[in-house]
């Protein structure tokens, strides 16, 4: 992994975040590029930690903070790899398996942008009154869902409705993993 690979991945994500599919040309679409894109897990980790610190309410009594942090860390890493694995099955169903490495690379790098958006929204929302804070959070969620849809549509080269299904699969997987992580973190 070189600094050039990281720069290309982040540049791709920034272009995609602006609705420019040309960002995909910065990735070579190979299995090697897909594997290298998992470096985004490390780059995004401080953003994820900051987001959790800004947005997590106080812990209820009886919750072991070490156990919760451990569960969150494990869940964070698993979610990246589980998404890639589930999307391989989705790529097969969509008859887009040859484009799966490109999708994984673009998806992983775009996750860095998504975390920046969520963190910025959480920081802004933390100083706003309820309705405005909710509006900022809702706008960030809407933008991130659009970005996921755009990456899925362009990287898999599929029509918009199929890209909605890809995002839906990711959303269901993410909710399942988040629930499991919280349950394990709480000792249930």
Image (cartoon, rainbow, N blue to C red):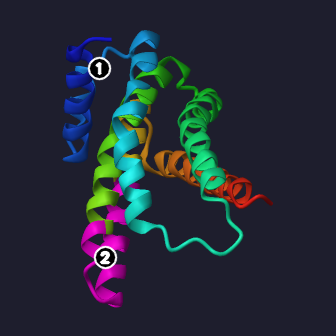
Magenta region includes residue 114: no
- Residue 33 image point, x, y percent: 38, 15
Q: At 43% across and 10% down in the image, what residue appears? A: 32
**Which segment is the magenta one?**
123-146
Q: Quadrant of the C terminus?
A: bottom right
Q: Quadrant of the N terminus?
A: top left
Please say if 73 is above or below 109: below
Q: For residue 131, which quarter of the picture?
A: bottom left
In the rendered image, is residue 93 in sight?
Answer: yes
- Residue 159 image point, x, y percent: 43, 43
Q: Secondary structure at mark 1?
A: loop
Q: At 53% across and 45% down in the image, what residue appears? A: 166
Q: For residue 37, which quarter of the picture?
A: top left
- The residue carrying pointer 1 sits among few (fewer than 14), some (14 to 19) or many (20 or more) residues within 10 Å by Cα, namely many
Q: Taking 62 as reference, is 128 left or right?
A: left
* Magenta stretch prevailing secondary structure: helix
Q: Taking 181 as reference, is 167 left or right?
A: left
Q: For residue 156, which quarter of the picture?
A: top left
Which residue is denoted by mark 2 in the rendering?
126
Q: Earlier in the sequence, mark 1 or mark 2?
A: 1
Q: At 68% across and 65% down in the image, what residue appears? A: 63
Magenta region includes residue 127: yes
In the rendered image, is residue 25 in sight?
Answer: no
In-front residue for pair 114/59: 59
Q: Secondary structure at mark 2?
A: loop
Check whether the beta carbons of the residues at disc 1 and disc 2 lie within 8 A of each other: no
Q: Residue furthest right?
A: 188
Disc 1 and disc 2: Cα gap in Å? 36 Å
Which residue is denoted by mark 1 in the rendering?
27
In-front residue for pair 114/183: 183
Please say if 127 is above or below 90: below
């Amino acid at each position: 992994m070189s600094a050039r690979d990281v720069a290309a991945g982040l540049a791709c994500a920034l272009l995609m975040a602006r609705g420019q599919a040309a960002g995909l040309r910065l990735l070579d679409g190979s299995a090697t590029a897909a594997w290298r894109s998992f470096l985004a897990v490390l780059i995004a980790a401080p953003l994820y930690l900051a987001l959790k610190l800004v947005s997590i309410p106080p812990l209820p009594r009886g919750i072991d903070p070490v156990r919760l942090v451990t569960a969150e860390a494990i869940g964070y890493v698993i979610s990246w790899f589980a998404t890639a694995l589930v999307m391989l099955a989705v790529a097969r169903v969509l008859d887009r398996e040859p484009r799966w490495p490109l999708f994984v690379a673009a998806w992983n790098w775009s996750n860095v942008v998504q975390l920046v958006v969520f963190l910025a929204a959480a920081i802004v929302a933390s100083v706003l009154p309820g309705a405005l804070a909710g509006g900022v959070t809702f706008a960030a969620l809407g933008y991130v869902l659009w970005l996921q849809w755009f990456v899925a549509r362009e990287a898999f080269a599929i029509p918009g409705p199929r890209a909605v299904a890809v995002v839906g699969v990711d959303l269901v997987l993410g909710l399942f993993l988040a629930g499991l992580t919280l349950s394990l973190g709480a000792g249930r």
